[in-house]
Amino acid sequence: MFTIGGFALTGLAIDLLSDEVRGTSHLRWPLGWTPPESWSPFQLILLIGSIIIATALIRAVMEYLHQMAVGRLVHVDIVLKLRAQVYEKMQHLSFRFFDKTASGTLINRVTSDVQAVRLFIDQVIVQIFIMAISLAVYLAYMLNMHVWLTIVCLMTTPVLWLLSALFSSLLHPAYMRSRELMDDLILSFSENIQGIQTIKSFCLENRQTRDFKASNEEVRQQRQGIFWIVSTFSPGIGFLTQVNLVILLGYGGYLVIAGEFPLGTGLVVFAVLLQQFSTQISNIAGVADSIQQSLTGARRVFEILDTPVEIKDPAKPRPLTRAKGKVRFENVFFEYKPQNIILNDIDFTAEPGKIVAIAGATGSGKSALMSLIPRFYDPLKGRILLDDVDIREFQVDSLRRNVGIVFQENFLFSNSVAANIAFGYPEATAEQIRKAAKIACAHDFIEAMPDGYDTVLSESGMNLSGGQRQRLAIARAVLLEPQILLLDDPTAAIDPETEHEIMEAIDSAIQGRTTFIVAHRLSTLKRADFILVFDHGHIIQSGSHAELMRQEGLYRSAVELQAVDPASLALLAGKQRKKGGSAE
């Protein structure tokens, strides 16, 4: 309204000057007001100019308040809260979601795709609202000035809408592909940073650089295609709006010459309004571009928010404070992907305080079985019972607080050693942290570090050896004092001497606790009370080490492979005879 008011006042000033030049007096003042006859033309122009400045100031203040309100709404209330909401939702999604979604995609969704939602609100919803009001006001004002002139000048508008629809249909798949390529680029960058040691060890820096440049070039070409579409559409819209202006000059000029339409408050104001109307129509290109760009990102964000939480608490969870530790698998079937059974009819019972070793070839289902106990996944069929209660009846957090886990590959955070050990129990005292470290045989090497327990680890704990990282992970699990321990091959990255120390420490820590340990080393397997031998998702053998060694089968064959070869036995025997001879 303030914009139209400024245009109308400008047209009024033009008509005033025109009457003064021609010596006529056909000027009609708005709102039925008539200036005093004593006022000179200069005073009248000064009055009109003052009103124009006043309306411009009011408009500037309103635009400032509008920008502040929209900025606070979009950048603070929406973007920050939405990013936090997406992150929170991701924390509650199951492992299955992360199994099928690449890390590059997740990073891109939390960063740039959330910004796309901001773009949708700021550049689409707000702009469409402003555009709709502006077009309606401009159209109503032009129709009020001259109906037929308005109709003739806007005959090209339906063509503009058709072009806009075509423009959007071309942009949608282009932006979808652009997002996918950007996901791949981020994933490539992330993997190259994490795997820089491997890259350098194989002297593949140049090849990785070429691959990254190729991915980056693919993104550039895709974006260039989008820019080409946008760049083609915008001039076309601009051309049609100029056609409208030519029609106005022809038909409107005829009306002015015929005396049917005033020059200033008529043709000039109509021309400015038509230009503003055309500008809003031209903005359709930008809005359509923003719609496709933002909707593509927003759709990816809301795919996360709308993903159902697979592992969740029951409506009325059973209380679980401290479990006794009896674990039973009843005819359990499990699959990561449909029609790809990983565990097939698993049935066994682990009594409280017993050590259950899980052996088998890679891919036989050992880690899958371990992941079912803390409900990282739910079985396809069958039940898992804890103390004779289906674990799906417990609150997830209370169940997992009773389960200590040491993964095959453990992640350490860029924080102090003490904070990493106390990650699952931030309220732990310094004494509790030290006790856990001593149990895991980590206390000595921690004390030898520059700042002891306050030493800050580098990213992923890369300033530690593999064995040191493993011992910190064990300390982190032991600190919880869980009734169930899950150890996924905890001695795999440790030398035999350290393995002996850790296993002795674990022996003292697992008293009274049920322990599941994925193991390949004979020294670990012999410590177990009960061994499950897996092959392609089936339990093919079970029993103690002594029992399994008396049976023909996979277990005994695997153990025999770890025995000392005959040549080494002969050398050892000769060494013993030599020692015996010298003793005589």
Image (tube, helix red, strand yellow):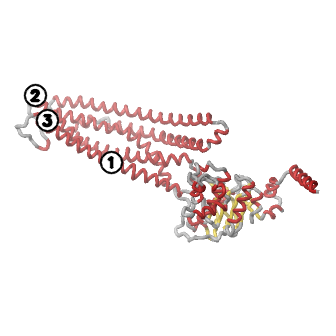
Q: Is residue 281 left or right of residue 315?
A: left
Q: Which residue is mark 1?
A: 68
Asked whether the residues under the numbered discs 3 and 1 touch, taking CB atoms below 8 Å apart as contact, a structural biologist would say no
Q: Residue furthest left?
A: 38
Q: Is residue 498 left or right of residue 97?
A: right
Which of the two labelled residues, at mark 2 and mark 1, occupies the earlier sequence position? 2
Sort mark 2 into few (<14), some (14-19) or many (20+) by Cα contacts within 10 Å.
few
Pick the residue in front: 97 or 320.
Answer: 320
Which residue does the image show at 40% across and 46% down from the upper left? 120
State whether residue 15 is above or below residue 513. Answer: above
Sort mark 1 into few (<14), some (14-19) or many (20+) by Cα contacts within 10 Å.
few
Q: Which residue is mark 2?
A: 22
Which of the two labelled residues, at mark 3 and mark 1, occupies the earlier sequence position? 3
Could one spot residue 65 in this view of the protein?
yes
Q: Is residue 194 left or right of residue 164?
A: right
Which residue does the image show at 27% across and 46% down from the upper left? 62
Tell me the amino acid under the disc marked 3: Ile
Q: Estimate the x, y position of residue 513 in percent, counting from the top left.
A: 67, 67
Q: Looking at the rendered structure, which numbered label has been put on residue 45?
A: 3
Is label 3 or label 2 in front?
Answer: 3
Pick the residue in front: 83 or 137.
Answer: 83
Could one spot residue 345 in this view of the protein?
no
Tell me the amino acid under the disc marked 2: Arg
Which of the two labelled residues, at mark 3 and mark 2, occupies the earlier sequence position? 2
